[in-house]
Amino acid sequence: MNAAVTTTKGGAEERLPATRVLVVEDEEAFVDALTVGLSREGFEVEIARDGGEALRRFDELRPDLVLLDVMLPTVSGIDVCRELRQHSQVPIIMVTAKAAEIDTVVGLEVGADDYVAKPYRMRELVARMRAVLRRQAGRNEVVEEQLAGNLLIEGAVELDIARHEVRVHGQQVDLPLKEFEVLALLMENAGRVLQRSTLIDRVWGHDYVGDTKTLDVHIKRLRAKVEDDPSSPSRITTIRGLGYKFNAA
Ligand code: CA
């Protein structure tokens, strides 16, 4: 999100970041219509009139979304999309002159987030833009949680420390507190062996009474919930004589 616009919320003037859109389009009629239509929807509009200009100015403009015509002078929209994807995850919506072109673009797997065919209605375009921006925001939230250490992801297993949730292949699984703590400790140290004594000490501390099987029972229950095949565990492996390891994805 880039520059600021003034908006009204609860009667008070507030500065909110405007979403900057880079429109890459060579037809003046579309440039004009998009500039007016998207500005009206609250977007900040930047225009590049050919593929080369789009690539040259991308880093300077840092758009939040790119609306990219397929048929462009100098560098085609397909090549622009491929080039941007080398170093950016910016949401890209490809605009084709006919619906048939969409199949070609999709088939080429250029890395665009969505596609619209001309002629399109402004309302449909804006809805698609908002949808890809929402998806991007969701991805950013996940990345932020990961960076904050609140979300551990190893392959199909996601552990959300703050929310106390575990998902395997996207499905939530319920874990009692101690099982959750064992799994969190293993995943925080994914790829490294954790000694039995370390796990016991960190999870049970002084509460741990005698029975050395307690840890193994918890591991067994965990495997039943997070392994694809609990009888042949691939995620939580036993390192004989030492302890357990969560295999890094
Ligand atoms: Ca064109």
Image (cartoon, helix red, strand yellow):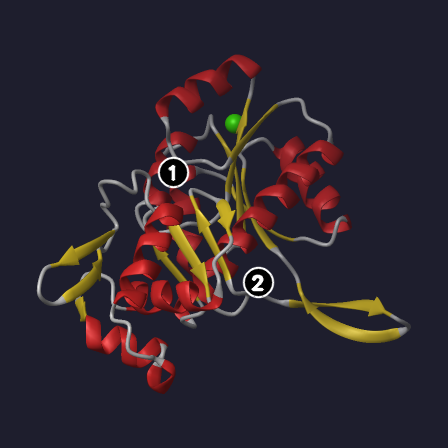
Q: Inspect this view and state whether residue 62 appears.
A: no
Whether residue 31 sits left or right of residue 10 in the image: it is: left
With respect to residue 75, does 84 lie above or below? below
Whether residue 47 sits left or right of residue 107 in the image: it is: right
Element assignment for label 2: loop
Q: Amino acid at mark 1?
A: Val
Q: What residue do we see at 45% from left, 38% from top? A: 50
Residue 198: x and y in percent read 23, 77
With respect to residue 100, does 33 lie above or below? below
Residue 162: x and y in percent read 52, 70
Q: Is mark 1 within 8 Å of ligand 1?
A: no
Q: Nearer the viewer, residue 5 or 200?
A: 200
Label 1: how many residues lie within 10 Å, few (<14), some (14-19) or many (20+)? many
- Distance of mark 1 from mark 2, alpha carbons? 22 Å
Residue highlighted by disc 1? 80
Q: What residue do we see at 24% from left, 45% from top? A: 233
Residue 193: x and y in percent read 16, 66
Q: What residue do we see at 34% from left, 79% from top? A: 208
- For this orientation, the residue located farthest to the left is 241
The picture quadrant where one finds residue 150 is bottom left
Element assignment for label 1: helix
Q: Nearer the viewer, residue 113 or 200?
A: 200
* Residue 1: image tag: 2
Label 2: how many residues lie within 10 Å, few (<14), some (14-19) or many (20+)? some
Q: Nearer the viewer, residue 205 or 247?
A: 205
Which quarter shows the N terminus? Answer: bottom right
Q: Amino acid at mark 2?
A: Met
Q: Earlier in the sequence, mark 1 or mark 2?
A: 2
Residue 77: x and y in percent read 43, 32
Q: Nearer the viewer, residue 6 or 160?
A: 160
With respect to residue 171, does 160 lie above or below? below
